Image (cartoon, grey):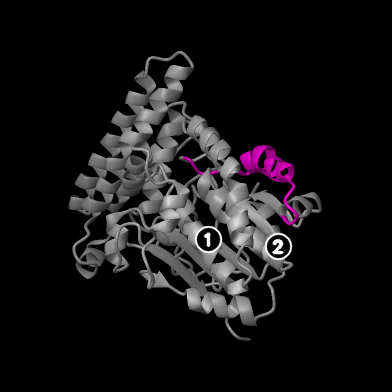
Amino acid sequence: MSPSAFPSLADASAYAPTTFAWTREATRANGGITTDRWLDVFAKSTVEFVNRARESEEASGGDGSRARAFGDAFARVLEACRGLTCEGDEDALERTTREAARSEASTSYGDDAPWTGLNCLEMCRVRDGLLRSHGFYDCFARVKREENRAALKTLPSVLADVDAKADDAERLMNVVRGCFAGNIFDLGAAESAALFGNGGGDFASTKDTLKKRPWCVDDFDALKTRWLDGKPHAKAIMFVDNSGADVILGMIPFARELLRRGTQVVLAANSVPSINDITAEELVEHILPALVDLGDTILSPAIADGRLRVVASGSDMPVIDLRYLSEEIVNEAKDADFVILEGMGRGIETNLFAKFSIDAMKIAMIKHKEVATLLDGELYDCVVKFDPAPRR
């Protein structure tokens, strides 16, 4: 099936998915964050990927050799990229990364995307492609299942806390803070993966200790004004991120507030597994049925009559290029008047400055020091960027 662009991009021909360029010119402009430092971000996180791959392989009787082979292959690509960047050989960089990224298990929607240089999106494509070509289709499956079960047990108390706020503005702030707290469950970033591995980063304590406002990107007041003074949205497309606390304790309560206002909500999730990101299949087969079983007076009827539903985005990465989406999500988005891009990959490292013809929100917690530096923030700082639809 052919991919299509998100229909509410303000100008699809001018759209550039990646937020931070890795060029030499960009290095001079962004305080010395070089391509080497960006490649180090990927190198540091490789340990988590190798460990999860080995765990998956050994669970099926393997000896861990495929996991080691993946780690070695990715390390070789990283080193090749360092050398080719120094040489300024863009053709070789494109050839090296695109060849490494090829995998029969990917959606391949973005394989024909024009080369614009080495960047976060290209390196995610390489890493995920190498995992799949070494036989690891979903090596984070076990931890996703465990975190989903734990989050579903916690959800009733989270919803009760939201409902205890009688004021619309208070409830909005509560669910926005919940989105930040949930987004810490990100095993693709070395810092948050280490925090998770050490038993930290639980939802309640993270929510209680969030950085105080103003956040490094803080459009909450503009969001609140639109929320309180504007007409409720007819339909929201919500691009979700991680499994567990992120989607269940963060994004589901936000979706519930939209439903409370009469807004239809479409959850757009990956078509193919990537890191610990939730997939559309997992949402449909496991999460939505569990939400129905809760008997919540807002969620259960909305799922039953389709006002809360799930569509596969067409993506197979933790970042997203909105020019290469599934036909299903494009069709759903044609009459949407609100788009939400959640998570550091979809809402900061890609699409932070993307322009839309409808109301747009990007929301995430920062888990890379380099991103924090470029946004004049701190590690675990918060981003809520709200761009109202242009006046017609």
Q: Earlier in the sequence, mark 1 or mark 2?
A: 2
Residue visible at 63% across and 66% down in the picture: 7
Foreground mark, 1 or 2? 2
User: Around disc 1, counting alpha carbons within 10 Å, would you say few (fewer than 14), some (14 to 19), or many (20 or more)?
Assistant: many
Q: In the image, is residue 293 part of the stretch drawn in magenta?
A: yes
Q: For residue 44: magenta?
A: no
Where residue 284 sits in the image (x, y, percent)?
A: 68, 42
Q: Position of residue 340 (x, y in %)?
A: 56, 63
Query: What segment carries the magenta color?
Result: 276-298
Q: Nearer the viewer, residue 184 or 187?
A: 184
Q: Position of residue 70 (x, y in %)?
A: 35, 29
Q: Which residue is mark 1?
A: 341
Percent across and percent down for residue 128 are 43, 39
Q: Hey, which quadrant is residue 51 in on the image?
A: top left
Residue shown at the point (35%, 57%) measured from the top left? 380
Residue at the far bottom in the pictured view:
392
Q: Residue at x 74, y 67 (%)?
A: 262
| Residue 312 visible at all | yes
For disc 2, the neighbor class at 10 Å (few under 14, some 14 to 19, many from 20) is many
Magenta stretch: dominant SS?
A: helix
Q: Amino acid at mark 2?
A: Leu
- Marks counted in the figure total 2
The answer, for residue 138, to whether it is visible in the render is no
- Helix, strand or loop at label 2? It is helix
At mark 1, the secondary structure is strand
- In the figure, 168 relative to 150: above or below? below
Quarter assignment of residue 230: bottom right
Marks 1 and 2, how far apart at CA: 18 Å
Q: Which residue is mark 2?
A: 259
Dot 1 amino acid type: Leu
